[in-house]
Amino acid sequence: MISFCTLFDSYYLDKGLALYNSLEKVSDDFTLYIFCFDDKSYEVLTDMYLKHAEIIHHSAFETEALLEKKAERSKAEYCWTCTSVVIEYVLDKYNVDSCTYLDSDLYFYSDPQQLFDEICSADADVTIVEHRFKDNEYGRKLEERNGKYCVQFNYFRNNENARKVLTWWKDKCYEWCYDIPDPARMGDQKYLNTWTRDFDKVHELQHLGGGVAPWNLEQYTLKKSENNNIILETSDENKFPLVFYHFQNIRYMPGRKVNIKSQTKNKKLKYEIYIPYLMEIEKIREMLISKYNMSYEVRGIVRSSNPVVGFLQKHFAAFKVQSFSDIINLDKLDRYL
């Protein structure tokens, strides 16, 4: 049994349900512990009776110390602060052998067991995933700002060594966890930079299919796509199955348009990955609107507590277009395939 955990509120409920659905399609041996950050998401998910999910209300784990952080940090910063907390909660309360944190905007295309086979072979207590930014000046700047590793798929075995790493991470995030570039810190993420040096049995995931995302997608080409199985290829002809994709930074726009921000101009590649995902999100949204009276009106993104970063996010980041083929008409999704 694979134990995953994730966290989100009702605003990310559509993405969280897509994540759950994707896991059900590729695995029948998992539990997804879902931490609901508002009452609406908890009410909806509890009513849905998801077979492979455990639904947890935020009040179950929020301590006075956490609530103090909640009052002084932005919504995103508070979620980052809680990443290590929810992993620890699952390990403590459910006494599972391991717990792997997943960002709620991930989507699985093939069985994650292949990733855990690698983790087992490496005899790892902790596993982290590189961003795999492109090896150029721009990629190095991205890594300098965001860190070498991405908090998206983070494995912790339930043992003393892994707990040592997890506790250190939690303490650091309690101390400082902001959306502010800093030489040694950025949210909960840059803390991971030193783990392979400072702790034992920390493994860097080698399977390229775990961690494909907008920031590295342009490095790959589409080799094959059949029955939702996507095979990608590197420039040196290394072929690998896409295990999960990180749909980070999708921005909905007025007029039933969405900016997918894929960071690649390869239409065939981006559409094979993004269009089926957008179709599923649309179906989920229709269900949530009709059955649970939810609303998905276009709204501003949650801004950073840093006033300069917040201004740029509000006025430029949401709809910045790098490729016109990234603008998708949600009413005509079929025509892109």
Image (cartoon, helix red, strand yellow):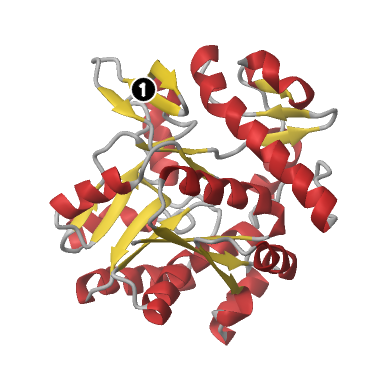
Q: Quadrant of the N terminus?
A: bottom left
Q: What is the quadrant of residue 127 in the picture?
A: bottom left
Q: Is residue 227 above or below residue 302?
A: above
Quadrant location, the C terminus: top right
Looking at this view, is 249 or 332 the one in front? 332
Q: Is residue 170 above or below residue 220?
A: below
Residue at x 53%, y 61% (from the top left corner):
51
Is residue 183 something one can see in this rendering?
no
- Residue nearer the viewer, 150 or 279: 279
Q: Disc 1 marks which residue? A: 232
Q: In x, y percent, where is residue 244? A: 43, 39
Mark 1 residue element: strand
Locate residue 220 relative to residue 320 in the image: left or right: left
Circle 1 Cα neighbour tier, 10 Å, few/some/many (<14 / 14–19 / ≥20): many
Q: Residue furthest bottom?
A: 64
For badge 1, the amino acid type reads Leu
Residue 137 placed where, x, y %? Answer: 37, 25
Quarter of the image where one finds residue 79: bottom right
The image shows residue 103 at horizontal and vertical percentages of 50, 52
Horizontal placement of 5 versus 100: left or right? right
Q: Residue at x 56, y 84 (%)?
A: 63
Task: Say whether residue 293 is left or right of residue 326.
Answer: right
Query: Which residue is painted at 57% across and 20% down in the image?
Result: 271
Q: In this picture, is 74 found above or below 336?
A: below
